[in-house]
Amino acid sequence: MGLPFHPFWLIILLAIVLIIFGPGKLPELGGAVGRGIREFRKASNDITSEVRSSMDQKDTPAPAPEPTTTTTTTATTAAAEPKAEPEKTS
């Protein structure tokens, strides 16, 4: 089983990239590609580990929910004083 592309095409591609970007930009371009690959690999590892941990959690039985206790507070009402009736004037 050989390479999926001919080595001659790789040389032509590298020559075109060298002409377009120049020799000064090639290290920056290589570093940017390396950082991109590294970030992609880290993100895929994070997603894979998250999926595996969620699958592990599904395999283990969930703990029984704790009963909720509610506390009620009683409001105290002050005794209302009787209102004085207005005097009737005739």
Image: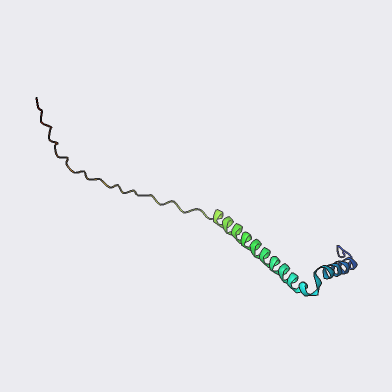
Q: Which colour scheme is used?
A: rainbow
Q: Quadrant of residue 41?
A: bottom right
Q: Is residue 65 above or below residue 15?
A: above
Quarter containing the C terminus: top left
Q: In this view, does 88 lie above or below 6?
A: above
Residue at 53% x, 55% y is 60
Q: Is residue 60 above or below residue 7?
A: above
**Where does the image place residue 15, in percent across and percent down from the top left?**
86, 70
**Where does the image place residue 38, in percent across and percent down from the top left?**
68, 67
**Where does the image place residue 75, in percent across and percent down from the top left?**
25, 45
**Where does the image place residue 29, in percent across and percent down from the top left?**
75, 69
Outermost front residue: 90
Q: Quadrant of residue 59?
A: bottom right
Residue at 12% x, 32% y is 86
Outermost top residue: 90
Who is closer to the viewer here, 5 or 34?
Answer: 34
Q: Quadrant of residue 24?
A: bottom right
Quarter containing the N terminus: bottom right
Outermost left residue: 90
Q: In the image, 27: left or right of 59?
A: right
- The mark tally for this picture is 0
Who is closer to the viewer here, 54 or 38?
Answer: 38
Q: In the image, 61: left or right of 20?
A: left
Residue at 80% x, 69% y is 21
